Amino acid sequence: MPIDAAARSERQQAILQIIGEQPVSRQSELVRLLKSRGIPATQSSVSRDLRQLGIAKLDQGYGQADSDAQPANPPPPGDFVREAAAAGANLLVIRTAVGAAARVAVYLDRTGWPEIVGTLSGDDTVFVATDSAAGQRRLRAKLKADFEL
């Protein structure tokens, strides 16, 4: 079924209004709030809308992801990192405190370190793909220095 641009625009404007008025911590809550305003929505349509609007899940709920406000090289995320272990030639596994993996992954993504190709985080684990085996060793040394491992 084709997407009605007017309906999408109305839904996106309503999303912006809702998150501007109150904290919203779950997409299902946002779907419910949209439906209560008479705006049809599904979790997948809301997910697409949030991505298109540049809205991210922040500490207090969904909000504008203002990349200009983020420091280019943020401070290390405290005492969250527990260990960093090599897993193959181009993969580093970082264990964190429970719930801290996403914060550590964001920190790593924003450092701009050339060894990092990408990160993937769970609840207490971050997988870091490196550009080479030598890059993995350099990154592990940086992490040991930054996080005093």
Image: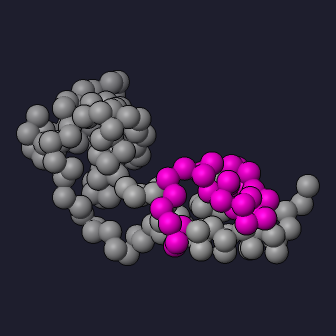
Quarter of the picture containing the N terminus is: bottom right
Q: Position of residue 57 (x, y in %)?
A: 47, 56
107 and 22: which is toward the camera: 22
Q: Quadrant of residue 35?
A: bottom right
35 and 98: which is toward the camera: 35
Residue found farthest to the front: 36
Tell me, yes or no, whether the highlighted magenta stretch contains residue 38.
Answer: yes
Magenta region, main secondary structure: helix
Task: Identify whether 109 is placed above or below 134.
Answer: below
Task: Identify whether 20 is placed above or below 128.
Answer: below
Q: Is there any visible trace of residue 84 in the rendered image?
A: yes
Q: Quadrant of residue 134?
A: top left
Query: In the drawing, does residue 58 fall left or right of residue 137?
Result: right
Q: Position of residue 88 (x, y in %)?
A: 35, 24
Q: Position of residue 130 (x, y in %)?
A: 35, 40
Q: Is there any visible trace of residue 131 in the rendered image?
A: no
Q: Which contiguous range is marked in magenta?
A: 19-46
At 78% across and 65% down in the image, what residue appears?
Answer: 38
50 and 146: which is toward the camera: 50
At 22% across and 31% down in the image, what residue appears?
Answer: 84
Q: Quadrant of residue 68?
A: bottom left
At 12% across and 38% down in the image, what residue appears?
Answer: 144
Query: In the drawing, does residue 95 fall left or right of residue 67?
Result: left
Look at the image and name its color scheme: one colour
119 and 52: which is toward the camera: 52
Quarter of the picture containing the C terminus is: top left
Residue found farthest to the top: 88
Q: Position of residue 125 (x, y in %)?
A: 34, 32
Tell me, yes or no, whether the highlighted magenta stretch contains residue 41.
Answer: yes
At 19% across and 58% down in the image, what residue appears?
Answer: 75
